[in-house]
């Protein structure tokens, strides 16, 4: 019993570190053009309207197809393509392992899927509200795909 509790603590600690790194990366990383709270200083309704027009994409697959097209016609580098497409798939994959390990209720695909979609939508909304990064339906699609793929692989090999 102590071993199980110890493992649970390790999973929670590792997941907490991952979450801290994830939030730091998607909200505050200069490498990916994130500015955290900097854009909020003096932000007006007009700033939010402009951000919505420039930094929100609600058309499914528009960005994904744009990256494939850009790669084909050489207007997008292979590096940018890999970071954007595969990065968005892989970045949420740890959810597919940690959530079912830590929470029994997350061992059902339907609950897991709802939880992951809620978390990703929350992060996309935060990016908009903080005026940092881009809020894109394709991020939701790719992030969810990555988390669900990891979930299915984990469930296949896990002893539960």
Image (cartoon, rainbow, N blue to C red):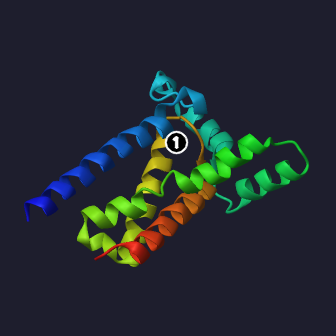
Of residue 25 and residue 43, the one placed in the foreground of this image is: 25
On screen, residue 74 versus residue 48, left or right, reads right
Q: Which residue lies furthest to the right in this view?
A: 73
How crowded pointer 1 is (Cα within 10 Å; few <14, some 14-19, many 20+) is rated as many
Q: Residue furthest left?
A: 2
On screen, residue 98 versus residue 134, left or right, reads left
Where is residue 60 shown, x and y percent of the image?
A: 67, 63
Position of the N terminus by quadrant: bottom left
Where is residue 52 shown, x and y percent of the image?
A: 61, 43
Q: Find disc 1 in the rendering and name its residue.
A: 128
Where is residue 67 shown, x and y percent of the image?
A: 77, 51
State how many labels appear: 1
Residue at 77 percent across and 58 percent down: it is: 65
On screen, residue 115 versus residue 66, left or right, reads left
Residue at 47 percent across and 56 percent down: it is: 121
**SS label for mark 1:** helix
Of residue 12 and residue 106, the one placed in the foreground of this image is: 12
On screen, residue 76 versus residue 79, left or right, reads right
Residue at 24 percent across and 71 percent down: it is: 104
Residue at 89 percent across and 44 percent down: it is: 74
Where is residue 147 shown, x and y percent of the image?
A: 48, 62
């Amino acid at each position: 019993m102590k071993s199980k509790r110890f493992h649970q603590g390790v999973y929670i600690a590792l997941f907490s570190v991952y979450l801290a790194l994830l939030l730091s990366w998607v909200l505050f990383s200069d490498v990916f053009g994130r500015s955290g709270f900097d854009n909020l200083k003096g932000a007006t309704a007009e700033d939010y309207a402009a951000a919505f027009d420039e930094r929100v994409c609600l058309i499914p697959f528009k960005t994904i197809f744009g990256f494939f097209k850009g790669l084909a016609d050489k207007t997008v580098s292979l590096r940018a393509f890999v970071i954007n497409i595969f990065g968005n798939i892989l970045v949420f994959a740890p959810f597919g392992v940690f959530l079912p390990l830590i929470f029994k209720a997350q061992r059902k695909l339907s609950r897991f899927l709802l939880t992951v979609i809620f978390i990703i939508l929350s992060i996309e909304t935060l990016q908009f509200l903080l005026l940092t990064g881009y809020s894109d339906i394709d991020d939701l699609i790719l992030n969810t795909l990555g988390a669900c793929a990891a979930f299915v692989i984990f469930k296949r090999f896990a002893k539960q």
